[in-house]
């Protein structure tokens, strides 16, 4: 990976390659922006800030991340790149000079208010307005038309993509089928039908169905999470509990699972000293991969016969599953907990795990971009129960721990995690090929 100075501004939000990451901002507050910055990373910090201000599901969040970063990427490619754009290169208007950062800022300022109309981006917009273009203006001055047009094209391309479908989910009480657990109605049940960014459909990479309820494999999976994921578990270690909460980020006010992975992307990009054009491509690979991974995950959750109930339901109703190797525990509760102390399971079918699918997509995108899996990094979490740092020696090890954490939290089976990791990596391969 070639590393140089930034195209327009020196890197200032840096971290040591395996040191404590500089916190761009805490959950729920805007960053204190330094004087010299990489604006691609800045706008992704603004995106994560918006995540903390809007309690949205993974699908809508990843869609917004993909739109922002595709707009930034097509801006960069149009002005300075010889790589393949996501949609198309935007031509320059004659008689103007084009400063890259000026156009990156214009793209972000066009997209973000459209994606998050209720979020106040004033701190970020004020910082961007202080930027002074570098070089000499053309006869008619400097233009930001490339950034604005790139953003408008991405927004237009996503109009009518199915993301606003609110058709309610028809719940079933058949054994094995998902039903509400008390945390709310089904979350975005039609997201698997949203038009993907790179795939042909959400079913293109559909995973195989999980083990049947009456199988020994299902019993083993259920009994494992029953033991390790219980709120009062005597088999889960303290380290496993830390892992469970480190990757959770399910509650309102956190940057949610997509935001955590974007935060980790920032830390690695800074440590590897990527310049703006490189960071734009990395963020776009990650964002497109996570967006399509969310669609694949929701297709598997709602649009296949799996529709697998969460462990919380399965354990309480084990007497109805027809499996001689499972036993009901009507009072069983998961480790997963809301800010008010309420134990909960995410309001969507268990198979496949969204956390695992996003993690697989993230790790696959990072590995393919850097050409290696073996990059060490130290990262943090926004979950209120575990805000310590953890260190990883590879992208895949972080993704595997992320996926496994859902068993420790009591909200998924290991088969959900395994299938999610595999599906996410397949999505990342598709996205990488699209932009190569």
Image (tube, grey):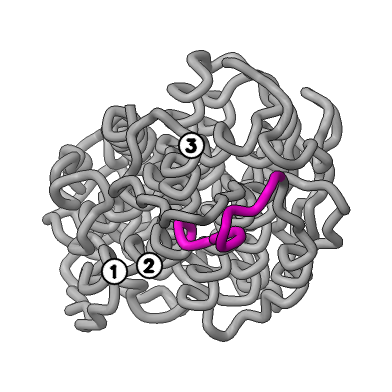
- Mark 2 or 3: in front is 2
Residue numbers of the magenta segment: 135-147
Instruction: Please indicate whether residue 302 sits to the left or right of residue 5 in the image.
Output: left
Which numbered tag is attached to residue 152?
Answer: 2
Which numbered tag is attached to residue 156?
Answer: 1
- Crowding at dot 2, Cα within 10 Å, few <14 / some 14-19 / many 20+, comes out as some
Residue at position x 70%, y 58% in the image: 383
Asked whether 395 or 230 is in front, the reply is 395
Q: What distance separates the C-alpha of mark 2 from that of mark 1?
A: 6 Å
The answer to whether one can see residue 86 in this image is yes
SS type, badge 2: helix
Looking at the image, tell me whether mark 3 or mark 1 is earlier in sequence order: 1
Residue at position x 44%, y 40% in the image: 77
Give the main secondary structure, helix, strand or loop, of the magenta stretch: loop
Does 33 sit above or below residue 268? below
Q: Which residue is mark 3?
A: 281
Q: What distance separates the C-alpha of mark 3 from that of mark 1?
A: 21 Å
Residue 141 lies in magenta, yes or no? yes
- Crowding at dot 1, Cα within 10 Å, few <14 / some 14-19 / many 20+, comes out as few
Q: Are marks 2 and 1 in contact (CB under 8 Å)?
A: yes
């Amino acid at each position: 990976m070639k590393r140089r100075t930034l195209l327009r501004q020196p890197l200032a939000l840096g971290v040591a390659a395996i040191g404590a990451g500089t916190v761009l901002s805490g959950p729920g507050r805007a960053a204190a922006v330094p004087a010299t910055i990489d604006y691609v990373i800045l706008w992704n910090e603004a995106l994560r800030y918006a995540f903390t201000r809007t309690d949205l599901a993974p699908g809508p969040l990843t869609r917004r991340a993909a739109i922002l970063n595709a707009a930034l990427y097509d801006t960069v490619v149009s002005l300075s790149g010889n790589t393949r754009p996501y949609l198309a290169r935007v031509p320059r208007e004659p008689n103007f000079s084009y400063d890259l950062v000026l156009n990156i800022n214009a793209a972000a300022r066009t997209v973000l208010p459209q994606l998050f109309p209720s979020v106040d981006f004033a701190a970020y917009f004020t910082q961007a307005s202080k930027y002074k273009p570098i070089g000499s203006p053309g006869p008619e001055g400097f233009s930001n038309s490339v950034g604005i047009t790139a953003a408008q094209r991405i927004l237009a391309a996503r109009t009518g993509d199915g993301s606003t479908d609110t058709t309610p989910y028809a719940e079933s009480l058949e054994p094995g089928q998902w039903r509400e657990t008390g945390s709310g109605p089904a979350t975005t049940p039609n997201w698997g039908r949203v038009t993907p960014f790179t795939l042909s459909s959400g079913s293109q990479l559909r995973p195989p169905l999980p083990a049947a309820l009456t199988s020994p494999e299902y019993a083993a999976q259920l009994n494992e999470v029953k033991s390790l994921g219980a709120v009062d578990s005597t088999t889960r270690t303290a380290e496993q509990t830390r892992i469970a909460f480190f990757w959770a980020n399910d509650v309102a006010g956190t940057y949610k699972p997509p935001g955590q992975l974007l935060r980790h992307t920032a830390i690695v990009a800074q440590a590897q000293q990527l310049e703006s054009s490189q960071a734009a491509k990395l963020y776009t690979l990650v964002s497109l991969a996570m967006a399509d991974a969310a669609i694949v995950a929701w297709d598997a959750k709602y649009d296949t016969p799996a529709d697998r109930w969460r462990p919380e339901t399965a354990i309480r109703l084990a007497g109805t599953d027809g499996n001689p190797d499972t036993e009901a525990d009507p009072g069983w509760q998961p480790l997963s907990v809301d800010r008010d102390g309420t134990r909960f399971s995410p309001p969507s079918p268990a198979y496949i795990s969204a956390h695992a699918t996003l993690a697989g997509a993230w790790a696959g995108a990072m590995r393919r971009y850097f050409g290696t899996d073996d990059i060490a990094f130290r990262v943090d979490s926004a979950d209120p129960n575990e805000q310590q740092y953890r260190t990883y020696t590879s992208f895949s090890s972080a993704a595997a721990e992320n996926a496994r954490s859902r068993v420790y939290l009591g909200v998924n089976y290991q088969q959900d995690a395994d299938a999610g990791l595999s599906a996410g990596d397949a999505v990342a391969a598709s996205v990488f090929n699209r932009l190569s």
